[in-house]
Image (spheres, rainbow, N blue to C red):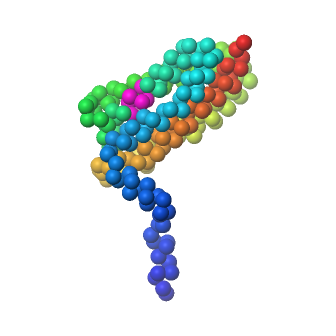
């Protein structure tokens, strides 16, 4: 049997554009990954503008807080995922900035949940349907955020390279969750406002 005929099964083929991208990524300073994650928060501008134009200043300030917390947290992130961060802060401050980001997200989720309950005037079958709909909308972004934390997706060895699975999944989280928030605010909250 000719071994070369089945060699494609043994060695995965990588598209030439991917090779160029990987070569480029290997030549950039490590903290560029931190800058990338911080920049992917740009799409929060849409729910921020929507809440401002609707006159909902509390949600507006909470969205601005979440966005700033995420940007600052990702710029200095060095306490996990082998992220380099900027060297002017250590792991303890990086951890505190990350907690600021997480707590801000939780508070924003509570605010939006409260607005949905208020605008559907308490518990009803319609509200239960809306909650199920919102849960389905949030499922993929939340999974993207949680997958890198699961044991199955952790590197087996104590590698010192940046966890690119985290970078990719968190980038997708940043690209999806602002539009989920925008949709929830637009359809389930601000459509009831005069």
- 46 left or right of 159? right
Q: Nearer the viewer, residue 177 or 24?
A: 24
Q: Residue at x 47, y 81 (%)?
A: 4
> Farthest residue toward the bottom?
1
Is any part of residue 167 visible from this angle? Answer: yes
Residue at the image position 33 percent from the left and 33 percent from the top: 76
Q: Is residue 113 visible?
A: no
Q: Quadrant of residue 150?
A: top left
Magenta-drawn segment: 69-74
Quarter holding the C terminus is top right
Q: Position of residue 121 (x, y in %)?
A: 70, 14
Is 129 on the left or on the right of 87, as rendered?
right
Q: Is residue 63 magenta?
A: no
Residue projecting furthest to the right:
126
Left or right of 176 on screen, residue 81: left
Q: Nearer the viewer, residue 19 or 10?
A: 19
Q: How many marks?
A: 0
Give the prevailing secondary structure in the magenta stretch. helix
- Residue 71 lies in the magenta-colored region: yes
Residue 156 in the image: x percent, y percent? Answer: 35, 53
Q: Nearer the viewer, residue 125 or 101?
A: 101
Query: 113 or 168: nearer the eye?
Result: 168
Q: Position of residue 98 (x, y in %)?
A: 38, 29
- Residue pictured at 54% horizontal, 32% vertical: 43
- Residue occupying image coordinates x 37% and y 38%: 34
Residue 47 at what x, y percent from top left?
Answer: 58, 25
């Amino acid at each position: 049997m000719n071994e070369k005929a089945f060699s494609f099964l043994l060695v995965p083929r990588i598209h030439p554009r991917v090779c160029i991208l990987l070569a480029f990524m290997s030549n950039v300073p490590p903290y560029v990954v931190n800058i990338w994650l911080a920049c992917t928060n740009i799409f929060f501008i849409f729910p921020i503008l929507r809440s401002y134009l609707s006159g909902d200043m509390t949600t507006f300030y909470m969205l601005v807080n979440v966005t700033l917390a995420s940007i600052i947290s990702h710029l200095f992130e060095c306490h996990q995922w082998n992220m380099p961060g900027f060297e002017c802060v250590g792991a303890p401050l990086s951890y505190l900035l990350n907690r600021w980001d997480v707590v801000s997200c939780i508070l924003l989720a509570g605010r939006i949940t409260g607005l949905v309950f208020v605008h559907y005037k308490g518990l009803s079958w319609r509200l239960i349907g809306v909650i199920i709909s919102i849960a389905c909308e949030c499922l993929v972004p939340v999974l993207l955020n949680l997958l890198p934390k699961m044991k199955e997706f952790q590197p087996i060895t104590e590698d010192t390279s940046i966890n690119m699975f985290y970078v990719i999944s968190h980038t997708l989280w940043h690209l999806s969750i602002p539009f989920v928030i925008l949709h929830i605010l637009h359809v389930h909250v601000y459509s009831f406002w005069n």
